[in-house]
Amino acid sequence: MSVVQSVDNVALLPAYLAAGTAVLVLLADLLLARAGATAAVAAVGAVATAVGAAVVGAGQTRRTFCVGADCSWIMDGRAALVAAVFALLALGVLGLSGPLLRSGPTPAGEYCFLLACSMTGGVVLGAAGDLITLIVALETLTLPLYVLVGLRRGSLASAEAAVTFFVVSVVATTLTLLGAALLYAVTGGLHLGRLGVLLGDGRDLPLTTAAIALVVVGIAFKVAAVPLHAWAPATYDGAPLPVAAYLSTASKLGGVVALLAVVQRALPADVTGPVLALLAVLTMTVGNLVALRQRRTVRLLAWSSVAQAGYILAPLGALALAAGRTGEAPATAYAAAVAYAVFFVVLELAAFAALVALRPAGGDGGSVDELGGAARRHPWVGAAFALALIGLAGLPPGLAGLFAKVTVVRSLLDGGAGWLALVVAVNAVVGLAYYLRLAATLYAVDPAPVSGAPVGRPAWTVGVALALATAVAVVLGFAPQLVLDLAAR
Amino acid sequence: MRLGEFLLVAVLALPALGAVAVAATPRDRAARVVGTVVAGLTLVGAALLVLGDHGWFGYGPAPAVQPWHRLDVPWVPGLDLRFHLGVDGISWPLVVLTALLTLLCCGYTLWRVPAGGSGRALVALLLVVEVGILGTFLALDLVLFFVFFEVVLLPMYAIIAGWGGEDRRRAARKFALYTLFGSVLLLVGVYVVVAAAGTADVVALTGGAGLSRGTQLAAFTLLALAFAVKSPLWPLHSWLPDAHSQAPTVGSVILAGVLLKMGTYGLVRIAVGVAPEGARWAAPVLGVLAVAAILVGSLVCLMQSDLKRLIAYSSVGHMGFVLLGVATLTATGIQAALIGNIAHGVITGLLFFLAGAVKDRTHAGSLTELSGLRETAPRLAGLLGFAAVASLGLPGLAGFWGEAFAVVAAVQRGGGLWTTLAVLAAIGGALTAAYFLRLLRLLTHGRPSPAVARLTPGLAGAELTAWAPLVLLALAVGLAPTLVLGLAAEPVDALVGVLR
């Protein structure tokens, strides 16, 4: 066997582009020292990454860093989709950050660099083929966020949020690593596919179950699944708004992708299925019920995104039953989870973009009452916000959200998990209550007097991000098959 | 593209594009005119759908659903969703009724916009609601049916919350949450069927299509619950009185006139059609609940002192008759249900228009503040009397056929249970007459109350234009029920044929 590995650099192209973006941003900040130029470099890099991922993903599945049949880097259709979505999310969040970077103390160079680093983690995550790559990618995705969350200078809430997030996240990573180590001890393998084969053969050691549980639980922290969710609302609310948007979209997507990777390829479904079903039920129910009581906008969105994580996990819960593990049912479930996650991040990004547009530059999310009548002052932004919220609730005219829910329910019934479908359905009703309250507040006729300076026209970058996210949501609403096809690849 | 396909698309695309055009028209009055014109064109398109082959001319056994026109193109194969539309004798009368009521409501807003928001937005929302309702009646794909079913929800919520009475927020939220609860059950029910059958084509699925008994029972339970919320069936009706009494006049007319029919139509076309074995199994329960709705509705109405609430509760009773007709699962019963649907839509639409007129003029809704209407406003009182008499089921007017034949169908069904139900329903019919006569006595007779004494006898031209078609239809359907039944006979026979 040759010691020199041949590396398929085409497969690695998206990762190169993403990492190159981070380096270029750093250089641009050093050499040009202008916030606009730095952000532009980051934006161009993100677009290039998305295009690169799309080009690579359009071809055959490419593998590299292989030992025998097991590969550490698998660039298939879904990995390309994940990479492209991460790049576009970073681009969108960059757009939302325009007013924040222009308004004051936030250093643009560091901000864009950290965002690009986090994007790199996301791009690598989708293609990760072994546990080490997976965990390193997940950490590359998360690490920059600790700093980004704390970037609202002079805000105690921001610092608190950063520390909370850091402590919880490190604990979660430790658990995942411990689980991975135990799995290695039991099986001697780290590649996801190999683990799948080895663990599928038979498990006599009780240690194996503990190891599996540790890995799943550690990743569930990142998804903010109940009961491992408590960090999310405080962190979102303390972070600058664009970072909160990134946390609730990209960071959550990262957790979902990691979870899917281990559940689909490595871990035995009969152990993970019941755990995931339980997590899904708890996550959506608790998230929705607590969101009902929220008075601050970002906390409401945070709790709602906890609930949405429950819907993402729900299709995987079908693996708990034997019917969900046979035939085409598992593939449908994985595809449904990916599809739901994609629909969700588009709508969530649109919602946050609208919120950024309605709030003063660099401000926090404020309370729900402060948005009273906002749609009457800013009809287009208000309409986009309402559309995103209604989409998150899963109703027309937010067709993208409707089809997302339909996808989940369909996959659950295909897997014979009718009870879980009913739980999802009832939760959708609870969810509507608070989404509707927020949307109705936007159109309130007799709003509470707005404190502080009136908000003028949103910055153009925010406007473009909002328009693009809304346009994508509308297009996906009429052509959901685009996402369904990509997710099933 | 053939004429039928063109019409099917046009009937949905016209109001959809119209809503956009209305929203984009800068001047409020011009926007309302645009909306009314669009609604008128939609009515023409809906009426033209009747052209086409009505019989089955092919070889072999006739299918259970024989649409006069159909359009079938794939939309989202990943979710088994096809854009599959069609119209037949069961859906066509409802389609025309929807288009007619929307036109009347849009025309009415030309004359008067209820307080709360711009008339432009109201007309745009009315048109979106129309798209949803028409789509529901035209859909021949289970998933598409669900999608259109959902389309109605938020625009109607916005109409109630934006232009309603004092307690509009609560009423609107209750409406939205209740109906969404129904429609998520519909979603689960639809995919229970689709997952088992592998298709969402209503034409192929009607008659059970080899679904196992367990699947059919589960599907029927879920679907019937969903439609029972929408119809509404006692005890899931409690959203209705609030929503109807708080909604603006045009909202109440659409709600009572056609929105409720989405429930009963769905029950006939989807629930009974797709899961006949489940329907047979659940028919006694459905019948008992329907009769309970009739009795509860009429008893509440006897005690009710608010005009709009009384009419709203009368809907619970009338829809009870419709559901009793469906529950018998006989050709007579389903025919009674269909004509009852149309009659209720026409008459209750008219009643809500009249109640709105009374309320707009007197600013009073309670029957204790209203009396002696015929002294100061004889024409309004006369029309109200006509509508009330039509609603209580006087022979010769539209309300009679649905109620009488629902009872007849229950008697024909035979057996102790159904005979008892028929007797109780007949008693409910008598109670209906009692509370409408009480309403007329309180409202039109006696000395004029201060609120009524101010009234002038005249009616606006816009009001007469909006009401005249409904008065004429109530008479026409009453005198010649074959207008509805003649078209529905064949599809109902085909449906009942596969139920056996």
Image (cartoon, helix red, strand yellow):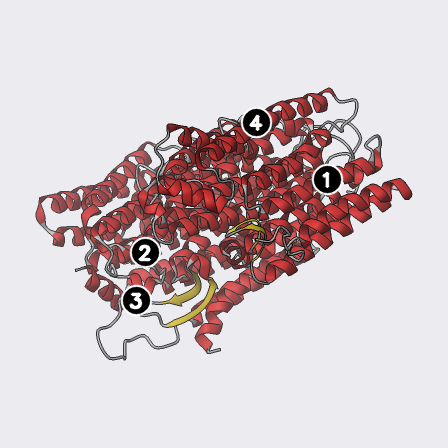
Residue A463 spot, x, y in % from top left: 74, 47
Per the image, the residue denoted by label 2 is: B270
**For the residue marked with disc 3, what is the amino acid?**
Val
Residue at the image position 35 percent from the left and 63 percent from the top: B201
Q: Is residue A405 left or right of residue B262?
A: right
**Is the residue at mark 4 from the same chain as the one at mark 3?**
no
Using the image as rendered, state which of residue A120 and residue B226 is in the foreground. Answer: A120
Which callout, 2 or 3, points at the residue further toward the start of the chain? Answer: 3
Q: Is residue B356 left or right of residue B310?
A: right
Per the image, the residue denoted by label 4 is: A174
Using the image as rendered, state which of residue B40 and residue B354 is in the foreground. Answer: B40
Residue A388 spot, x, y in % from top left: 60, 44
Per the image, the residue denoted by label 1 is: A115
**For the residue marked with disc 4, what is the amino acid?**
Thr
Q: Are marks 1 and 2 in contact (CB under 8 Å)?
A: no
Question: Where residue A322 is drawn, which disc sits there?
Answer: none
The alpha-carbon separation of the residues under discs 1 and 2 comes to 51 Å
Task: Report in which chain the residue with disc 3 lies.
Answer: B
Furthest residue in direction front, as rendered? A1
